[in-house]
Image (cartoon, grey):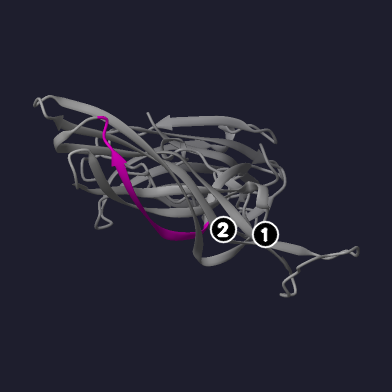
């Protein structure tokens, strides 16, 4: 069964051009072949007939049409935009039969017969195609029914009914977007904090007292906590449900940068808080960083590992809390956040 999933992050994507067969028209076909065969010798009975179709081929028949709708029987000069409608199929092939009979000496003998056939088939709904040279005929649900009667000791009358579905298939080139397999998809959305509704509102993160900054570790933007008011708390957080499982440890890593404006007197608390399916907190992993431990005007990566999660865990929250103390005038920048199972 195909694996289906949805990718909803705003991430760089890669598109590639592929060629796919597209069924543009189809029709059910029935061919009746009646024949009489003289056996090589006298026969008491015909035991069985095994039939197959060989060299089955369908040739599409096109009608040339102007885009305006008029049928173009002939065009002499001028620049006319034309299209082609696949309307009919010329069906050809060979019915091969292996005939087993019992001769007068009670011996089973074998002979064969080939009958070529041809039929013009009208498609149920003629369709416009993009490139006539890219159209081919595909056959499905092929069935053969042979009825026979030994009219005389060596004269065998047969009626074969061939049924199938003829499909006019056009190879078309389309562009598709490729995405990483599910196991490679990040747990956090917009990990580099690149998507903003405005300079105060990141799209995939909750935020309070946060401003967009172009001083980023990677990409174009990062989050500056405390930027609206350096003496008030600030927070940046996101709920995570994808990839959160019981009995595992998770590693939170991020890049941090103290923005020196004057005196720095704050702490930064990074947390991964775990919840059960009812939203009740059942675990937490956290690390606190003093302003003196954070590099000034330069990014540095820090990380920590959470305790093993409870078996009932269903979701988690990644949260950064900026907690200023008296006299603080600096802010802290966060960028390139990663949450992953250890």
Residue at horizontal 36 percent and vertical 42 percent from the top: 243
Residue at horizontal 19 percent and vertical 47 percent from the top: 151
68 above or below 149?
A: below
| Label 2 to label 1: alpha-carbon separation | 10 Å
Dot 2 corresponds to which residue? 203
SS of the residue under disc 2: loop
Q: Residue 79 magenta-drawn? A: no
* Residue depth check, mark 2 versus mark 1: number of the one nearer the observer: 2
Compare residues 51 and 241 and report the one nearer the observer. Answer: 51
Q: Position of residue 273 (x, y in %)?
A: 35, 46
Q: Quadrant of the C terminus?
A: top left
Compare residues 249 and 94 and report the one nearer the observer. Answer: 94
Q: Position of residue 148 (x, y in %)?
A: 22, 47
- Relative side of 270 to 149, left or right: right
Residue stretch rendered in magenta on the structure: 24-40
Q: Position of residue 262 (x, y in %)?
A: 71, 44
Q: Residue 29 magenta-drawn? A: yes
Residue at horizontal 57 percent and vertical 38 percent from the top: 291
Dot 1 corresponds to which residue? 199
Q: Which mark is residue 69?
A: none
SS of the residue under disc 1: loop
């Amino acid at each position: 069964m195909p694996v289906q999933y949805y990718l909803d992050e705003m991430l760089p994507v890669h598109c590639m051009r592929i060629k796919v067969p597209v069924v543009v028209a189809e029709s059910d076909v029935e061919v009746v072949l009646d024949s009489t065969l003289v056996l090589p010798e006298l026969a008491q009975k015909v035991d069985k007939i095994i039939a197959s179709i060989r060299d089955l081929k369908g040739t599409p028949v096109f009608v040339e049409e102007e885009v305006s709708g008029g049928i173009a029987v002939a065009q002499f000069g001028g620049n006319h935009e034309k299209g082609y409608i696949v309307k009919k199929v010329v069906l050809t092939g060979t019915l091969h039969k292996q005939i087993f009979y019992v001769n007068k000496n009670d011996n089973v003998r074998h002979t064969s017969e080939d009958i070529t056939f041809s039929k013009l088939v009208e498609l149920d709904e003629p369709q416009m195609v993009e490139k006539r040279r890219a159209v081919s005929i595909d056959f499905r649900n092929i069935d053969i029914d042979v009825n026979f009667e030994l009219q005389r000791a060596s004269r065998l009358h047969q009626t074969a009914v061939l049924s199938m579905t003829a499909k006019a298939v056009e190879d078309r080139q389309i562009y598709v977007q490729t995405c990483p397999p599910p196991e490679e998809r990040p747990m956090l959305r917009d990990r580099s904090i690149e998507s903003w509704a405005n300079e105060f509102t990141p799209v995939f993160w909750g935020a309070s007292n946060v401003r967009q900054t172009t001083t980023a570790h990677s990409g174009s933007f990062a989050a500056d906590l405390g930027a609206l008011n350096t003496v008030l708390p600030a927070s940046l957080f996101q709920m995570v449900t994808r990839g959160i499982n019981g009995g595992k440890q998770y590693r939170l890593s991020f890049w941090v940068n103290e923005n020196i404006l004057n005196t720095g007197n704050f702490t930064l608390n990074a947390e991964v808080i775990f919840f059960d399916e009812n939203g009740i907190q059942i675990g937490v992993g956290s690390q606190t960083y003093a302003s003196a431990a954070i590099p000034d005007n330069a990014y540095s990566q820090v990380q920590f590992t959470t305790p093993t999660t409870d078996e009932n865990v269903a979701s988690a929250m990644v949260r950064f809390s900026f907690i200023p103390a008296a006299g603080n005038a600096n802010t802290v920048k966060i960028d390139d956040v990663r949450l992953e199972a250890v």
